[in-house]
Image (cartoon, grey):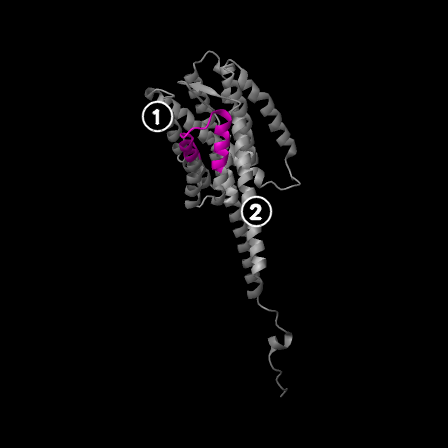
Amino acid sequence: MAAVEATQDHRRALTLVAQILAVAGAYYLAGRLGLLRQLTVEGAVFTPIWPPTGVALAALLFLGLRVWPGIALGVLLVVASITPLRPTVIGTVVGNTAAPVCAYLMLRRVGFRPAMNRLRDGLALVFLGALGAMLISSTTGAGLLVLTDKIAPGSFWAVWLGWWVGDAMGVLIITPALILVGRLHLPLRLTRWPEALALLLAVCCLVPLAAYSTLSLMFLVYPLLIWAALRFQLVGSVLCALAASVLITVAATDETGAFQGLSHVQVMIKLQAFNGSMALTALLLSAVITEQQNTRRSVQRACQELAEVLEHLTATDAPQERSPTQDEGPARPDR
């Protein structure tokens, strides 16, 4: 018996180590992907969307708090790939690890469901997981840059804002996409494939036009988001928001289209305002629509059950047909 328990403990330990290494590898790959597009504000370089924060929170939601060392190791690997390791790296590792961990703990505290089929789930992910918890990483990162004299103290708030919004966008855009991938079941059953193809075609045509047109047509993305949320709920809105965010970010970092001729600070403000409002629209609108549909289905099921109960009661209380002998009573003898 002891040998069996030892073997099971050994397997659990190996599984945990494998999960931690997988999280670290995914964090590192997401970090390298995020570093492909950068903006420079007040002498500091940051990414408009930092995918590792979304990867870290999704890993915690799927695997639990025990994989937090994988996040710390991933942060260390990303930092080591772009700058020599110094003692101040410890602060960066702590801040970037604590932010998704705090996001996970707060989401658990409020009963967050990864399915995000309730409005409260969308609100929790936006205000607790993204906007709230990412204050930790942005404050730690910008503060370390000031303390190490890499930026002037007067540049703290501009750098802090860019760092905070980049980390928050990673949660708002990447985490829902990874949740959808984790819930994906094959084979896919797409009952409205003609409409899905039409939506895909519209996204492929209008989003590049909005991203690279000098007429500032980025508002064209919002009708697509509304269409995707109304007809395909979270799946459609998240994928549409992801595609739009990537293309708009590429245009912004290339300083083309609607971002042509703007300063770096103006590019940051315009890009982050668009990405933030788009992510909020996609998550909250799809959550509201999904919740309403679930409520309608619950009401329909309750009505159907009530109709079945009434039908059963009616059949039970119906007067039984009496026999002729019972109706006529006992026969009287002739006088």
Residue linked to disc 1: 147
Tell me which segment is drawn in magenta: 71-96
Give the side of residue 23 with respect to residue 332, left or right: left
Q: Position of residue 57 (x, y in %)?
A: 48, 38
Q: Residues within 10 Å of mark 2 (few under 14, many from 20)?
A: few
Q: Residues within 10 Å of mark 1 (few under 14, many from 20)?
A: few
Q: Position of residue 91 (x, y in %)?
A: 40, 32
Whether 160 is drawn above or below 68: the answer is above
- Tell me residue 269's x, y (percent): 42, 21
Q: Is residue 88 magenta?
A: yes
Q: Quadrant of residue 333?
A: bottom right
The chief SS type of the magenta part is helix
> Magenta stretch containing residue 203, yes or no?
no
Which amino acid type is marked by label 1? Leu
SS for callout 2: helix
In the image, farthest residue toward the bottom:
335
Q: Quadrant of the C terminus?
A: bottom right
As drawn, the label of residue 14 is 2
Task: State which quadrant residue 144 falls in.
Answer: top left
- Label 2 sits on what residue type? Leu
Evaluate whether residue 72 shows in this view: yes
Kindly state the secondary structure of the residue where label 1 is placed: helix
- Report how far apart the C-alphas of labels 1 and 2 lie in the structure: 40 Å
